[in-house]
Amino acid sequence: MPIILRLDRVMADRKMSLNELAEKVGVANVNLSKIKNGHISAIRFSTLEAICKALGCQPGDILEYKE
């Protein structure tokens, strides 16, 4: 898969737990865990926006494209 999710790295940099982020974003822990571990095929822009707002980051900090 050429899109790599770096949510775990950004969360570690911000010292934010999965539970804390899930609460701030309003997404179930299990769904956020799937995003964190890259077990998704799509993400809603509204969810991505909420994650970026909670972590104070840009979408490019979370998503990476590699050939």
Image: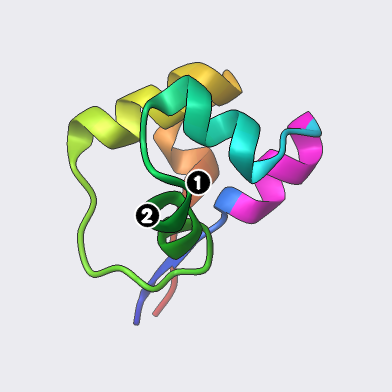
Given contact means CB atoms under 8 Å apart, are the residues at marks 1 and 2 in contact? no
| Side of 10 where 32 appears, left or right | left
Q: Is residue 22 above or below residue 12?
A: above
Magenta segment includes 10: yes
Q: Secondary structure at mark 2?
A: helix
Q: How many marks?
A: 2
Q: Circle 2: is it few (<14), some (14-19), or many (20+) Cα within 10 Å?
A: few
Q: What stretch of residues is rendered in magenta?
A: 8-14
Q: Residue at x 38, y 73 (%)?
A: 39
Q: In the image, what residue occupies the spot 44% across and 30% down?
A: 51
For image coordinates 64% across by 54% down, the residue present is 8
- Name the residue: 18% across, 42% down: 44
Question: The N terminus lies in which quarter of the figure?
Answer: bottom left
* Image quadrant occupied by the C terminus: bottom left
From the image, give the main secondary structure of the stretch colored magenta.
helix
- In the displayed structure image, the side of residue 47 where residue 58 appears, left or right: right
The amino acid sitting under disc 1 is: Ile
Q: Which residue is tagged 2?
A: 31
The answer to whether 41 is drawn above or below residue 59 in the figure is below
Mark earlier in primary sequence (1, 2): 2
Q: Is residue 43 above or below residue 11?
A: below
Q: Which residue is mark 1?
A: 62
Element on which disc 1 rests: helix
Point out residue 60 in the picture as x, y percentages from the top left corner.
45, 41
**In this view of the protein, which residue sits in the foreground, 10 or 16?**
16
Q: Position of residue 25 (x, y in %)?
A: 42, 26
User: Callout 2, which amino acid?
Assistant: Asn
| Image location of residue 32, percent across then percent down | 44, 50
| Occupied quadrant, residue 18 | top right
Quarter of the figure with residue 20: top right
Mark 1 or 2, closer to the camera: 2
Relative to 62, residue 35 above or below:
below
